[in-house]
Image (spheres, grey):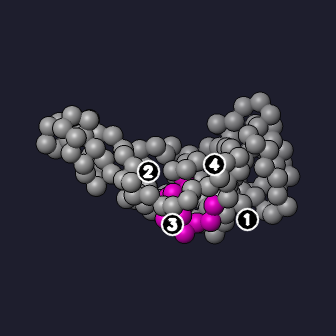
Amino acid sequence: MYVLDSSAFIHDFHTTEQTATIPLVREELVDESAYRYDAMEGSGMHVHIPNGDTTEKVRRAARESGDLEVLSDTDVRLVAAAFELDATLVTDDYAMQNVAERLQVDVEAIAREGIDEQREWIFQCQGCGREFDDEKERCPICGSGMTRKNPS
């Protein structure tokens, strides 16, 4: 089974396997991609609503990897749906791929190549430049804002 992100509908992803998605994806789509969603739903695509415990598990994994700040609620719930359904997540979003792989959820990219490696982001103070492993809104040393940084 494949769980489809918005990019699957935008890029007209085709498969003979069973498909699923979540209701929030429909809200992100317009024009032809919205029609594709409606047509697939009408022809048997499963619309899944992941439970709160699984959604929180995905949020924890995203927090640990440093991806939470760039994931929307839709993104988190899509990863949760793929986890619950033991399905392959179809997405071009690198942060979603990173979190999915962290949770051992298979991923298939559509229009781009998938990620090469899992990343655990670090956070750097915009003021004093100190680096932290944990995501913080403000630097505990100087109070400046923080940015996400690739550790390599």
Q: Secondary structure at mark 4?
A: loop
Q: Position of residue 135 (x, y in %)?
A: 30, 49
Query: In which quadrant will I find the C terminus?
Result: bottom left
User: Closer to the camera, 31 or 149?
Assistant: 149
| Residue highlighted by disc 3 | 103
> Is residue 56 shown in magenta?
no
Q: Are marks 4 and 2 in contact (CB under 8 Å)?
A: no
Say which label, 1 or 3, has the lower sequence index: 1
Q: In this rendering, is residue 98 above or below 29?
A: below
Locate residue 48 relative to residue 147 in the image: left or right.
right
Q: Mark 1 or mark 3: which is in front?
A: 3
User: Closer to the camera, 6 or 97?
Assistant: 97
The answer for how far apart the CA atoms under marks 1 and 4 are is 17 Å
Q: Position of residue 6 (x, y in %)?
A: 67, 43
Say which label, 2 or 3, has the lower sequence index: 2
Which residue: 59% across, 53% down? 78
Say which label, 1 or 4, has the lower sequence index: 1
Characterize the local packing of mark 3: few (<14), some (14-19) or many (20 or more) Cα atoms within 10 angstroms: some
- Quadrant in which residue 139 is drawn: top left
Q: For the residue marked with disc 2, what is the amino acid?
A: Asp
| Residue highlighted by disc 1 | 1
Which residue: 82% across, 58% down? 15
Q: Are marks 1 and 3 in contact (CB under 8 Å)?
A: no
The answer for how far apart the CA atoms under marks 2 and 3 are is 13 Å
The disc label shown at residue 92, or none: 4
| Residue highlighted by disc 2 | 67
Region of the chain picked out in magenta, as a range: 96-107
